[in-house]
Image (cartoon, rainbow, N blue to C red):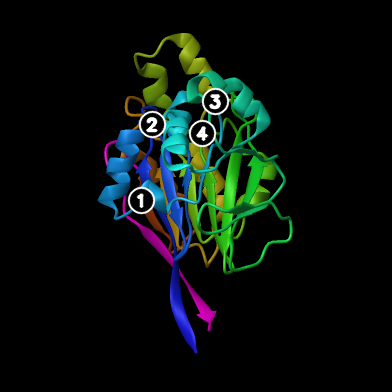
Amino acid sequence: MKKNNSFCICPLASGSRGNAVLVSTPKTAILVDAGLSGKEIQRRMAAVGKTPDHLSAIIITHEHRDHIQGAGVLGRRFNIPVYMTKATYQACAKVVGKIPDIRFFGCGESFAVKNCNNVMDDKICDASLLTVHPFSTSHDASDPAGLTLTWQGCKIGIATDLGIATNLVKEHLRDCSVLYLESNHDPDMLINGSYPWHLKQRIKSRTGHLSNADAGMLLSQLAHQNLKHVILAHLSEENNRPEHALAEAGRCLNGSSAVLTVAGPDRPGEIIRITADISV
């Protein structure tokens, strides 16, 4: 007999004011980044029917404050393992404070997340477990990471804060059912906007953020017939508009039937579900 089970992703917040993404299976939930206050993350999780008690892990992609603000508070209050690279921890230790259960990963080293706050390091991972594959990205942080997450043969890719989409990034993001991808700015809006020149240069640099056109080009290389959903993320509130990002991405999906949505800063997005058929 088979039963349907869902592999889910839900943006809780996306943008320069804070980033957090909830990913879950029927028995496991993780938070990718915790860039809001602990209280606000709890409020947004409650809005989608979850609490931090459901979390088996918090995974931090890099040390910028809009990705780490609530990590220490939640880790301490709910005894949640917090995962990041050693270099990331060294860069943010004073901000996150003491974390009772800090665990380090290296980019290129996969690990599996079990239920009940039990995280297992294992390069050979059972398909029933939520498996995390970190990979290096190009951003002005100590050791930034993108992630793919797999469960029961389904794959979700998460890659924001990308100055450029390297071949390594493209290789890891291939064959995803869902992509959570940065589409940070409209180049004309950025150049003509109010940001100081040094900040404009940083955003445009190879260690800055992807423009709508960059994100579209990446999508054109990643689109395939089994891509179900693309979530455009980390949009600049001043230098972009959701309609601009959606239009550029839509032109570049090469006829794919994938659904396009935008993750916003102020409230949780919709819960995206991928269904896996599991023999029981």
Q: Are marks 4 and 3 in contact (CB under 8 Å)?
A: no
Question: In the displayed structure, would residue 38 be above or below residue 273?
Answer: above
* Residue 210 picture location, percent across and down: 51, 33
Callout 1: 10 Å neighbours few (<14), some, many (20+)? some
The residue at which mark 2 appears reads as 18
Q: Which residues are the magenta region?
A: 263-280
Question: In the displayed structure, would residue 8 be above or below residue 210?
Answer: below
Q: Amino acid at mark 3?
A: Gly
103 with respect to 243 (left or right): right
Inspect the magenta stretch and tell me whether residue 122 lies in it: no
* Residue 207 picture location, percent across and down: 59, 25
Indicate which disc residue 208 carries: 3
Q: Residue at point 50% right, 41% down? A: 215
The residue at which mark 1 appears reads as 261
Gap between marks 2 and 3 measured at Cα = 17 Å
Q: Earlier in the sequence, mark 1 or mark 3?
A: 3
Q: Amino acid at mark 2?
A: Gly
Gap between marks 4 and 3 measured at Cα = 7 Å
191 with respect to 153 (left or right): left
Gap between marks 1 and 2 measured at Cα = 18 Å
Q: Amino acid at mark 1?
A: Thr
User: In this view of the protein, can residue 154 be seen by the observer?
Assistant: yes
